[in-house]
Amino acid sequence: MDRRIEVENEVLRRVKPSPEEKKRLLAVVQDLLSKVDSTAAGLGVSGIRAKLVGSAARDTWTSGTHDLDIFIPFPVQKTRDELEKYGLLIARDIAKGADRYEERYAEHPYLNMHYRGFDVDMVPCFAVGCASDMKSAVDRTPFHSEFVKTHIRGMEDEVLKLKQFMKGTGVYGSELRTQGFSGYLTELLIISYESFEGVISGACNWKPGVVIDLHGHGTVTHSESLVVVDPTDPKRNVAAALSLDRFCRFIDACCSYLEEPSLSFFFPEPEIPLTDQQVLGMISERESSFVAIVFGKPDIVEDVLYPQLDKMESSVRALLEQHGFSILNSSRWAGEQAAIVVELLCAKLPDVKKHRGPPVWERKHAQNFISKYKGSADTFAFYIEDGYYVADIKRKFTAAKDLLQEKLAACSMGKQLTESVRQGFRILENEEICLIEEEDFRRSLNKWKGN
Amino acid sequence: MDRRIEVENEVLRRVKPSPEEKKRLLAVVQDLLSKVDSTAAGLGVSGIRAKLVGSAARDTWTSGTHDLDIFIPFPVQKTRDELEKYGLLIARDIAKGADRYEERYAEHPYLNMHYRGFDVDMVPCFAVGCASDMKSAVDRTPFHSEFVKTHIRGMEDEVLKLKQFMKGTGVYGSELRTQGFSGYLTELLIISYESFEGVISGACNWKPGVVIDLHGHGTVTHSESLVVVDPTDPKRNVAAALSLDRFCRFIDACCSYLEEPSLSFFFPEPEIPLTDQQVLGMISERESSFVAIVFGKPDIVEDVLYPQLDKMESSVRALLEQHGFSILNSSRWAGEQAAIVVELLCAKLPDVKKHRGPPVWERKHAQNFISKYKGSADTFAFYIEDGYYVADIKRKFTAAKDLLQEKLAACSMGKQLTESVRQGFRILENEEICLIEEEDFRRSLNKWKGN
């Protein structure tokens, strides 16, 4: 117990912003908010009162994080076109004072800028009356911010500890690359369990299907592993984007932490890229077969890239399994290039393949199967087994590499990856994996090194 | 149609006993029956009237078959000890006139003798009032004989054709080696469908679960593929011993015959033993891995031997699969020696083995799994996948041969095979299979040669 208090105090010491850091942030926020309001007025858009939302607004940001979310709420009478047009006009005007800026697109366009050392998102939205009335996807954010602000008071440090714990254990962040816990979800967990310790012990008893409903007002049955009903919208599951994997990793981390608390959960040692020698050692120790598909990374944002990589990874697995290859593990990686790595039990299969046909008593299907395979030149043997016709036939692809070379382009993997793969790809086998020298790729191979 | 009549006439010409052959048989039967009756009287056992049962009694025996079943019915008041004692005394007395004889044991002892060119079983039984009152397993046979005799009249030739068709297609014989159709079952099928053609077309529409109940008096639900309710005992399925495999082979043969009738269904070309060169060619073409376990054949009757071989075959398959080997096919063989042959996708697996543990949220099991595998010297990597803990660990047996060498003796395979294997066995791999030179073994390899 003492050990835990010691660890958590040290965590807070490291991640809680100092009064000076807070002061600096507040000054920039004030500057931005008043600029938005006056710019709006100057453009003839009346009644705009910009809002700071996100962790900066709730005192739940960790030291060193310089992210600001400024929302520009438009009256609901405005059209979406007007919102986009005036929203960007206002934001661009303010961006004149920024180091650099760019327009980005989620459901509608917004501006990201580097402003006085801060990473600022300036997002136009509609000032709807309640979250469930939203006209655009971002409209609910101010309600989240409001809810947290009024319920988190006195528990801000607990949020800081939990966020850092999640960052350290790799489950923080709701973007599609990670599919982990969002900031809002983290805050709701603290509000629900009332402390860092409460969340950690609570999660130790989680099972898929656990429901947390602060207001007991949930109206919909959700199928996700974790259901946290949005206090501002009874139909919504705040944890909908959390993957089973991150859900489980969090449970695992919580239980391990309770057993043996240590600072390394919050601040783990960075993973070290494997050297050529380590890669070769890993492969020869396991004796399995590695195949990497390497191709150009398309120039798209991560939230588009990673779902396509995930899709490609599972298509490649399905293709290999369909053709009789047994998969041990796989992973996807994107850096300068991109790659799918698959570990196979065997990369080479025998010529013969067992092909099961219809049951003997389904005569229509049986006749087709018989006339196709019985006595054919590519049939080694034809027989009945467990009630089914079976033909031992010639396997089309005996090497995983040949199969991928010929069939990869037909795999389902999203628009941009399909284009990229059509432009070319390489298949690396076993020690050839060392041809990818990027450190981040070599770090990703720690998955197989373990321990 | 003409073709079929032509084929079937030729079959009858070959298998229907000539009047001379029948006369010879009848003479021997008369001789035996009267000898039994007088010997019984001589021994002071009154009221014995020996009976000829089986196909010889029903005119459904095929030419060249010289099997006689003589039953010696004792009054039901006799004890089993008396039945055995006097039954054998009578039989042994008659065996004095035989070329040779031996005592055999089914449920109770009987005598088998070679007598004037015939293979005679002389079986003591109880003269019960009806089949379902039977005191010993053989007591129902006379009722079967009686039923067939009174219902088969005029359809004897149809039985001959069907029996020969079943012999030729390898599905005749209810002994445990074959698990095919018994003579009685064959006769009931003819009585039910009224002709050879009727059975063949009928079987083409069979599916597992088909029920044939001549008297519509069945009282029990059976789970076997084919249910033929015994007209002399409503609780009994005459086809209970028929395996799914023989059931399916029969359906397949019937459909093929209807499509293209030919004499080869009744009189197939004998299988030719594979030469060394053919064995080697077969293995190298398929590219799979063959493993044969060779051991001494215990000196036991086939009905004891084959169930043990079947058990051993499935135990060996289970052992290999448990340890990650993929099986393509397998077979069992007994000649001078005995062997189980297994064809594997790969006989060698990599060092690494994926070992799935409990779900992350089952903490009790999880703790055991973690403390056993996480960070252990034999663990390559430890991670969470699809909600489960997984350890990539060192495989204990990477070669099928090593696995069998160490674990075969512990496989379940019946008393006599266990003893035989304990006395020693050899594992042959791939081309080493040629070390078994017995023709009958080489014939059994046609399973893999096919076409």
Image: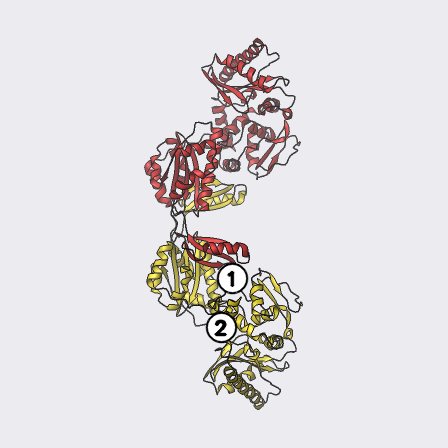
Chain colours: A red, B yellow
- Please identify the quarter of the rendering in which residue B203 is found: bottom right
Q: Position of residue A381 (x, y in %)?
A: 43, 58
Element assignment for label 2: helix
Compared across the picture, whether A289 is left or right of B15 comes to left
Q: Position of residue A418 (x, y in %)?
A: 44, 34
Q: Are marks 2 and 1 in contact (CB under 8 Å)?
A: no
Residue receiving disc 2? B10
Residue at numbered disc 1:
B259
What residue is rendered at 53% in x and 14% in y?
A: A89
- The mark total stands at 2
Tell me: residue A396, above or below residue B32. Answer: above
Q: Chain of mark 2?
A: B
Lower position in the chain sequence, tag 2 or tag 1? 2
Q: Tell me whether marks 2 and 1 sit on the same chain.
A: yes
Q: Is residue A282 left or right of residue B88?
A: left
Can the viewer see residue B179 in this picture? no
**Residue type, numbered disc 1:** Glu
Q: Secondary structure at mark 1?
A: helix
- Residue B22, relative to residue B202: is it above or below? below
Q: How crowded is the residue under tag 2: few (<14 C-alpha within 10 Å), some, or many (20+)? A: few
Which kind of residue does numbered mark 2 sit on? Glu
